[in-house]
Image (cartoon, rainbow, N blue to C red):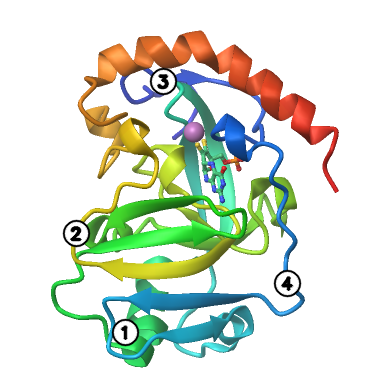
Amino acid sequence: MSAGSQLPPGQRPIDDFPRFGLPNYASRWPTVPVEPAIEVTGEVTTPATIPLADLADLSDVERRTSTSDFHCVTTWTREDLSWGGWGFRDVFEQLIVPRVEPYADARWIRFRGLDGYRTSLMLEDALEPDVLLADTLDGAALPLEHGSPLRLVAPGHYGYKSVKHLCRVEFCSQFQSSLGWKEHPRARVTFEERAQRLPGPVARRVYRVFLPVIRAVFRRAERQSP
Ligand SMILES: Nc1nc2c(c(=O)[nH]1)N[C@H]1C(S)=C(S)[C@@H](COP(=O)(O)O)O[C@H]1N2
Ligand SMILES: [Mo]
């Protein structure tokens, strides 16, 4: 979104792009394996482990760069981030489906990061054309604070759906809540689906109170970064 255009309801622009998230993950700096891989499991015919190197080798899946705004549920938006990687839909169709054959009723995907963080997306939301598996940010290798070696980027959904340090993809027949009331099953920013049960405009006010506290927790954790 270009400068001056309207942000989604309740969002305010910020100039930096902080490492951010739930406070209890602030000090969990994961160790990235020498040969990272994504485990694909759950409601599938054949579970598989896909080395990240296989992504780079895919002849039919072109690398892509895509510019998008990043909307954190706590109301900050960082505009115009340029992510590079692969379209999730391409990887799903060309690599994941042929290798694991998900069951027809697997309508949800739960993603997991190396730090243990988990969240789910509806399959049709994950297959939106703007959803990426990114390994670069603004033209440079994705740094650890923003989710190396590979992260999901789902620009139409609040930031908590964009799992960093992706290491597992689990197919599920139902929505599995991983973050309690804080996790709306879909979390679409245009509909202000911030949290479960709590209406968006109410959740917005609650988050604005806690935003400075959470920022301080992450700033402190930054000093302990490896
Ligand atoms: N693995 C992992 N992914 C995560 C989180 C996390 O703590 N761990 N936090 C989520 C939240 S709430 C936000 S807002 C974004 C923050 O991404 P950033 O740290 O690159 O700004 O990551 C999301 N993905
Ligand atoms: Mo967030």
In the picture, the disc for residue 17 is: none
- Distance from the alpha carbon under mark 3 to that under mark 4: 36 Å
Q: Residue at x 26, y 76 (%)?
A: 43
Q: Amino acid at mark 3?
A: Gln
> Sequence order check: which comes first, mark 3 or mark 4?
3
Dot 1 and dot 4 residues touching (CB under 8 Å): no
Label 1: which residue? 97
Question: Quadrant holding ligand 1?
Answer: top right
Label 3: which residue? 11
- Distance from the alpha carbon under mark 3 to that under mark 2: 30 Å
- Distance from the alpha carbon under mark 1 to that under mark 4: 25 Å
Quarter location, residue 30? bottom right
- 10 Å crowding of disc 3: few (<14), some (14-19), many (20+): some
Quadrant location of the N terminus in the rendered image:
top left
Q: Residue 16: x percent and y percent? A: 67, 27
- Asked which secondary structure carries label 3, the reply is loop
- Asked which secondary structure carries label 4, the reply is loop
- 10 Å crowding of disc 1: few (<14), some (14-19), many (20+): some
